[in-house]
Image (tube, rainbow, N blue to C red):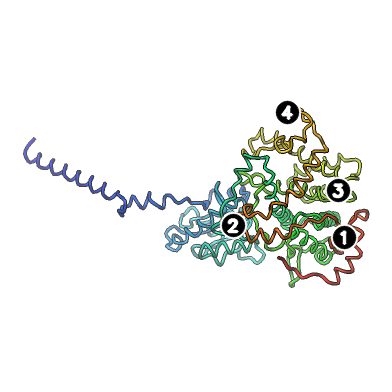
Amino acid sequence: MSLAHLVLFAGLLSLVIVASSSSSSSSSPGSRSILRDISGENADQKNRAVELNSSNFDSVLRDTPAKYAVVEFFAHWCPACRNYKPHYEKVARLFNGPDAIHPGIVLMTRVDCAMKTNTKLCDRFSVSHYPMLFWGPPSKFVSGSGEPKKEKSEIVVIDDARTAERLLKWINKQTHSSYGLDDKKFENEHVRTNITDYKQISQAVYDIEEATAEAFDIILSNKVIKSSETSASFIRFIQLLAAHHASRRCRKGAAEILVNYDDLCPSGKCSYESSGGKDTLGSFPICGKDLPRGYYMFCRGSRNDTRGFSCGLWVLFHSLSVRIEDGESHFAFSTICDFVNNFFMCDECRLHFNDMCLSVKTPFKKARDFVLWVWSTHNKVNERLMKDEASLGSGDPEFPKIIWPPRALCPSCYLSSDEKSIEWDHDNVYKFLKSYYGPKLVSLYKEKSVVGSKEETVSATAEDLTVATNALVVPVGAALAIAVASCAFGALACYWRTQQKNRKPRRSWN
């Protein structure tokens, strides 16, 4: 090798060493290298909003269990969009992902209109600026059904979402909720590991309020009161809630619906859309307009698509059963059977429940018999679902279906120690159910630990938990004229027709 080549080689080697040193230095803390921009702080932030495109838009929104969806249309080159993303993600963390604070309520999504593959999708929604946010039921976005500019469209443009605070305020207004950006997830771990803790059921008061409101929402959104039969079924169920719901604000809301029902649904034909400033059935929120939503606690599953509403509805049925008197037992039985048959939207569940109702040949005369029927029916449903979930792997892994109550919670409910062949002591089962879904359900509800930072809400709600023990003390409205005459409620129908129709209370919620 010539001297010239040696000099050139030495020069190149020195350049490599210097470059290596420079690279090492630029990667040190405090440097401004491009590596930091790619893998530094921004990489640690999780993107909770679901990125949609033309190929998955319909399928994701069709399959989501969420009740509402927000779709943000943006362009990746848009500075305003980049600046808005942290605000959007701050709200998305509340609703999206396995660690969602309030799962199953709102699906937060984004579509990049700067991608050519999404051009037609963005045109479909007449996107006129970036970022542009839309709100509506997920199904309404599917297959071109979204027409936000039409007056009656269920998809609307979110017109006030410049910051995370304002976006969440807008969502709260639409959902009648009180979510906060600093909300913490309700931890259920102690429920999974200590099923013998009686304090767990105190959390369920919140759940039966939410399940009641959600059942009412389903009836309204599906417009299922279509005949005199469904109207009578609805009235009887609301009547039962007005007398025996564990929450005073739900009893109050149900009573107000009864008082106004004849005007809202003349001849059983309900008005669902307001016209001329007239009230509709939806104008009377059954548990109050300020009821927080998305807070299932006792019934919260480990996945977004498990437990929740169905669990809350069962707890509601149990809590109603232990509050009725002997003379109301068969009325309560037929009322719940008709409610499920007419208004529960899961067809297989509805048919199975109806079969169990039809198997009862003799009218109930004792409240005890009805309490035990609800309990045994729930266990039969659990037995069926245990088999289905075992074969399909569709159950909640942390809350598998069980026969209730387990021995650990009520050892005296069992006559023998045989795990394969269960024999029940029905007297002790009845005592357990009366206590568990009665006083135990509400006795600990004032504890701040039940809802974390929501002390004010709990304090206000706790004052509403004086449980009615006699149907005769609850005001009922003109609609009760079509109720079952043999029930204790019927005696007051005519009286309250004249009294309440002449002085309808103004809607006022504590």
Which mark is on residue 480? 1
- How far across and how far down the image is residue 59, in percent? 59, 48
Mark 3 vs mark 1: which is more N-terminal? Answer: 3
Q: Is residue 358 left or right of residue 29?
A: right
Q: Tell me the amino acid under the disc marked 4.
A: Glu
Mark 4 = which residue? 419
Q: Residues within 10 Å of mark 2 (few under 14, many from 20)?
A: some
Question: Are the two marked residues, 3 and 4, in contact with CB atoms closer than 8 angstroms?
Answer: no
Q: Tell me the amino acid under the disc marked 2.
A: Ser
Q: Residue at x 77, y 64 (%)?
A: 271
Q: CA distance from mark 1 to mark 2?
A: 40 Å
Q: CA distance from mark 1 to mark 4?
A: 47 Å
Mark 3 = which residue? 334
Q: CA distance from mark 2 to mark 4?
A: 42 Å
Q: Residues within 10 Å of mark 1 (few under 14, many from 20)?
A: many
Q: Residue at x 76, y 63 (%)?
A: 281
Q: 183 or 382, which lies in front? A: 183
- How far across and how far down the image is residue 323, in percent? 81, 50
Q: CA distance from mark 3 to mark 2?
A: 40 Å
Mark 3 vs mark 2: which is more N-terminal? Answer: 3
Q: Quadrant of the N terminus?
A: top left
